[in-house]
């Protein structure tokens, strides 16, 4: 399975966006939201028109701790969103699936569209995380601020963020990081009521269930699309974990 990489070249990024426009303009808007803000694909698909129209930032809630993360919307993207949302009902999903039903495009369909667009211009390293990684890579190269990205993505340490965008760690930044406090907090939360083992067992149980049912003739293409998306993200997460300093 290919490593999902950011799109680093401006011309390639524009070509990818144009390809999405040609396929369906809504996928272009979806992509621009991801590249322009750093939002996760599933969060973008959850938005309704009223959630993003005339907004300068978007706030999403993640994890069991209900932590809120705020993502800024560039002015140029705000303008594109206003144009896209003209005459649309505020209750309608922003990235609408079928016009006859007020349901968003499925994550599997969005993933397939991104992959297809990539193949059309010769990119094979495209996945659900491409948008977020592209945003992060561009932001880091413009500002050098790895800490902002770490906080925005809720990563445990800067080393994970560096791995996420495919960059070598800046040793000077690492010397300033405050990992002892972060590690102490993680230790407490994982030991609290056995939460660490409970979470691991839940993940293991889910993966074992998927493995055992993988060859079932009852599975449809959507099932394999979901599994492919899941494994691609797991590959990225495992690579981050295995290559993060102990």
Image (spheres, grey):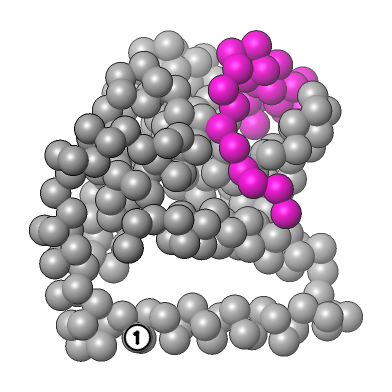
Q: Quadrant of the N terminus?
A: bottom right
In the depicted view, which residue is nearer to us: 214 or 82? 214
Classify residue 113 as left or right of residue 198: right
The residue depicted at 39 percent of the width and 40 percent of the height is 162
The residue depicted at 62 percent of the width and 43 percent of the height is 4
Is 82 located above or below residue 92 in the figure? above
The residue depicted at 69 percent of the width and 39 percent of the height is 125
Q: Quadrant of the C terminus?
A: bottom left
Number of dots carrying numbers = 1
> Residue 22 occupies which quadrant of the picture?
top right
Instruction: Examine the rendering and report whether any part of residue 53 can be seen.
Output: no
Q: Secondary structure at mark 1?
A: helix
Tell me the residue that label 1 is attached to. 197
> Residue 99 occupies which quadrant of the picture?
top right
* Mark 1: few/some/many CA within 10 Å (<14, 14-19, 20+): few
In the depicted view, which residue is nearer to us: 87 or 237? 237
Q: Position of residue 124 (x, y in %)?
A: 75, 38
In the depicted view, which residue is nearer to us: 129 or 49? 129
Q: Position of residue 96 (x, y in %)?
A: 61, 40
Name the residue furthest right. 217
Q: Which residues are magenta?
A: 1-29
Classify residue 104 as left or right of residue 75: right
Is 24 located above or below residue 211 in the figure? above
The residue depicted at 70 percent of the width and 48 percent of the height is 2
Classify residue 42 as left or right of residue 150: right
Q: Position of residue 231 (x, y in %)?
A: 63, 63
| Main SS of residues in magenta | helix
Residue 5 is inside the magenta segment: yes
Q: Position of residue 117 (x, y in %)?
A: 76, 31
Instruction: Examine the rendering and report whether any part of residue 2 can be seen.
Output: yes
């Amino acid at each position: 399975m290919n490593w999902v990489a950011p799109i680093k070249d401006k011309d390639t990024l524009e070509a990818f966006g144009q390809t999405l426009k040609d396929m369906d303009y809504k996928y272009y808007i979806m992509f621009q939201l991801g590249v322009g803000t750093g939002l996760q694909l599933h969060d973008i698909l959850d938005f309704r028109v009223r959630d993003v129209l005339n907004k300068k930032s978007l706030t999403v809630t993640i994890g069991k701790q209900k932590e809120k993360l705020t993502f800024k919307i560039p002015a140029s993207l705000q303008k594109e969103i206003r144009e896209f949302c003209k005459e649309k009902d505020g209750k309608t999903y922003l990235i609408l699936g079928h016009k006859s039903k007020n349901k968003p495009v499925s994550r599997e369909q969005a993933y397939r569209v991104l992959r297809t667009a990539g193949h059309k211009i010769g990119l094979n390293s495209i996945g659900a995380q491409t948008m977020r990684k592209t945003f992060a890579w561009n932001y880091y190269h413009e500002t050098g601020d790895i800490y902002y990205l770490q906080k925005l993505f809720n990563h445990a340490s800067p080393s994970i963020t560096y791995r996420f965008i495919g960059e070598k760690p800046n040793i000077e930044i690492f010397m300033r990081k405050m990992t002892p406090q972060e590690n102490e907090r993680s230790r407490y939360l994982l030991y609290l009521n056995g939460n660490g083992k409970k979470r691991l067992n839940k993940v293991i149980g889910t993966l074992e269930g998927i493995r055992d049912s993988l060859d079932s003739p009852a599975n449809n293409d959507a099932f394999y699309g979901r599994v492919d998306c899941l494994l691609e993200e797991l590959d990225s997460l495992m690579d981050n974990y295995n290559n993060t300093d102990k």
